[in-house]
Image (tube, rainbow, N blue to C red):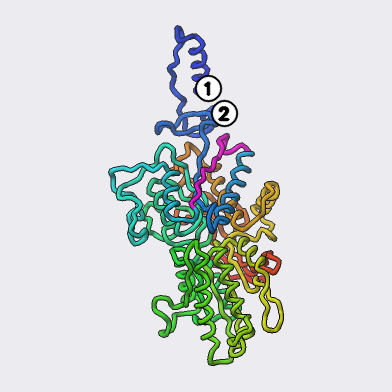
Amino acid sequence: MGLNQHSRVACAIALACGGAACSTTFSPQTCAIDTDCGSGFVCELRDQTPVCVATEDAPILIGQSAPVSGTNQALGTGMKLGIELAIKEQNEKGGVRGRNIELVFRDDAYQPELAEQAARVLVDAQETPLAPRCPTTTDSSLLGQELISTTALDRGPGAVLAFLGNVGTPTMVRAAPVAIETGTIFFGPFTGAETILRDNKAGPCKKYIFNMRASYAEEAFATLEYFKKKGVNEHKHLISFDQNDSFGQAGYDGLVAAYKQLIGNFPGSADPVNPIVRFRYVRNDDASVPAQVQGAASYLANLLTGNSSTHVVGVLMTDTYGAGSAFVQGLREWQYANDTQQQSLDKANRLKLHFSHVSFVGPNALSDRLVTAGRVQAPSGAMMPLTDGVVVSQVVPNYQSDSSEVVTSYNRLIAAAGAVPSFTSLEGYVAARVFIAGLLAHKGPFTPETLVSTLEKLPDLSLGIGASSGFSAGNHQYSSAVWGTSIEADGSFRNLYFWSEGLPIQFFE
């Protein structure tokens, strides 16, 4: 029996004696790691001192902020489901040396201000009179007029250990600065943005950020390689459809950078600010899409005018499923409409459109919407599925065909839960699996500061999510792999290519 257990027994005896001849005074057993404590006890901090406590008194609290309401609720619902599957799986195995993992969730409706509020609640943010620790707390160029705080923020007694699987770029820009200002780990966010997550804007506070997935820049690079294979070889044959905020800008910047690296410098005739033409819709407002369809249609009509060539056009789509499906449907209906432009431009035959959405789109929701919308009739009479030419660059393997360990486990769990599988919930599951591996590898009391060191030593877990995976002190991005998948007429996903940084792209078609 450990000292802490002896103390509990002694206390019980003292109470039974009425305090007359027994003492209730005792000192908790100090410890360094869990094995220093007896069965049923773990080593945790209490008043900054590592002591043995009962496992039921030491749950590991993980926070998540994501949309489960509003226009883009499928994104948050999917990530939350995947994370919950992994947590339930581990808790049924005994948790983390007896500790249960608990997810503390907040709905932010994909609204930046709600995401910041949720982050403050989840870290129990405490204002201090000291200067902020992180540049991102007061970076007006990043945050706009509303700064996160003019003073440092501390973690309160109710703070979660880490954030896991927060959803979105514009929401991340408000939530991540709160997390890292308080010294809380920001792990596996569902965004491939460079800003804050992969650049140096967070200064020394970037140590608290751990990315699981490939960046949007890497997705754009892989996408442009795919477009090149299809015959796109100059900037006039590229279009960006993107959300009018930091998310859309991240995708656009990635496409421009990829063009310079893969094709070359833009000609002098290109717009110096936006060298690739772009059409932007308003976040959470699918009604803003039709105007962008009209703009893109006019651009493509001009491309076809005055020549008889066939034009192959690649459209990189940094979007969400509602806006993305509306844009694809709108452009296809314009392309195949039997109108005066059809007679003069032969747009149905001379225009070859390839749409590629970044992974954040919500691939399954996008597929469902396109399949439900059905087909559009070409002038020839052929009924063309709206899924034709639609690709999604994924950052996890294709759960419909992959046989890796993590996908096999995910499919088993999702089936047992009676839920519908998706790429988004798979990403949530993968992120949670890696985070839990870090918890299992950790020795000593759980604090964000000490867990950072453990995660940096986490090797490739051989889950099957890329050629080279893992963290290190100099690399806080676990995977750089991208899987290109086409959406088939029945809504299924077919593998087109595999890309990973530093390796030649591999095509399957």
Answer whether labels 1 and 2 touch (C-beta < 8 Å).
Answer: yes
At label 1, counting other C-alpha atoms closer than 10 Å, the crowd grade (few under 14, some 14-19, many 20 or more) is many
260 left or right of 370 in image: left
Q: Which residue is mark 1?
A: 5
* Whole-percent x, y for residue 449 in the image: 42, 44
Nearer to the camera, 218 or 463: 218
* Whole-percent x, y for residue 346 in the image: 62, 87
Q: Which residues are magenta?
A: 93-108
139 left or right of 393 in image: left
Residue at the image point whose x is 50% and y is 79% from the top: 263
* Whole-percent x, y for residue 455 in the image: 50, 48
Nearer to the camera, 473 or 236: 236
Secondary element at image label 2:
loop
Q: Quadrant of the C terminus?
A: bottom right
Res. 30 image quadrant: top left
Determine if the magenta segment contains residue 236.
Answer: no
Nearer to the camera, 474 or 308: 308
292 left or right of 47 in image: right
**Label 1 is placed on what type of residue?**
Gln
Determine if the magenta segment contains residue 104.
Answer: yes
